[in-house]
Amino acid sequence: SNNHHILTAPSVDTKIDYQSVTARAIRAQYTASIDAITQMQNELGVDMRAAFVAVVISKLMFEQNCRLLGEAKERAVGMGSVRELDLSRGSSMTAAFNKTSDMASEIIPAVEEAKRRITHDTAHAPSGFDIYVTGSLSTLMRSMADDTNFVPSGITLGAPNSMVRLGSRGTDNYYYVPPSAGVVEEGEVTLAGSIVATFAEMLIVARNEQAAKAVFIGHVAVPVVTGDVQAVMFEQGVTFYTRQAAELNKNKRFGRQISVLRIINLPKSLTTELSP
């Protein structure tokens, strides 16, 4: 063939898309008199320095998770990735002949459908999902029937300043988010102009083993650094410093692995208030 290739060598045109992830500084400081520090150590056995660092880290993680989950929900709503599930299935008598655990089982097909849509839209199969619920819906999820393969964690939920793992089902983990966090909502909604129904939301987020494909990305530029403070006579304290980055994945493909499921007509055993 006159030293010419019979088949043309294939070529690939690529376009590199990248974004920056910026770490931000986090600072905290406490000071207390030597009398207060020594009294707590002697009477309560509490080290003020260690207690302060533990409180700051706990508050930092909680507020950071609330911020990230709130941004994820806003993105899901903006993309139109919101679906609705009516537990009454169009009948006002559904709650009368269904047990609460049976009604909880109605949620599973809707969750699986939301997961399927996420996988289809992103053309990527995650390693699992993290599902966040709040309020009465979290109680409903914990009472799921045994045949749903839901394994409860047994941890007490309801604290207004902490997220709790409710349990798991397969590779999916369920978490309780306090209503005060403002991530997922619950309340009442008006249907057909006059019917008032209770509702609660569920946030479904894909979980990936590879950091670049995760919904939330970040890094620790500077680990936690603490130091002693003795600027005032007869007072001691501790400084806390770290620089971290935590934000939604800016990659359009992997950053949209989220969905919101709104569940209406929750059972009255969970939502009925005391009569006036």
Image (tube, grey):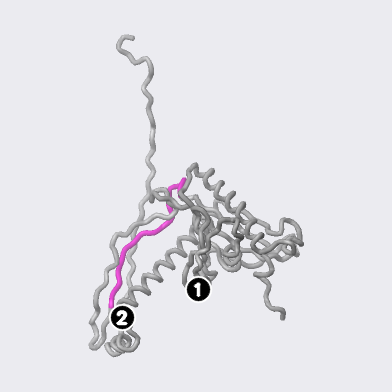
Amino acid type, mark 2: Asp
Q: Residue at x 50, y 73 (%)?
A: 160
Give the dominant element type of the magenta stretch: helix, strand or loop. strand
Q: Nearer the viewer, residue 154 or 115?
A: 154
Look at label 1 and name its amino acid: Ala
Q: Which residue is mark 2?
A: 47
- The answer to whether residue 221 is magenta is no
At label 2, counting other C-alpha atoms closer than 10 Å, the crowd grade (few under 14, some 14-19, many 20 or more) is: few
Residue 268, placed above or below residue 81: below
The answer to which of 123 and 234 lies nearer the viewer is 123
Dividing the picture into quadrants, the one containing residue 64 is: bottom left
Numbered badge on residue 159: 1
Where residue 201 appears, as percent x and y from the top left, is 59, 61
Secondary structure under badge 1? loop
Magenta residues span: 238-254
| Secondary structure beneath label 2 | loop
Q: Is residue 257 above or below residue 229?
A: above
Instruction: Describe residue 135's horizontal placement relative to residue 91 as left or right.
Output: left
Q: Say whether residue 174 is left or right of residue 265.
A: left
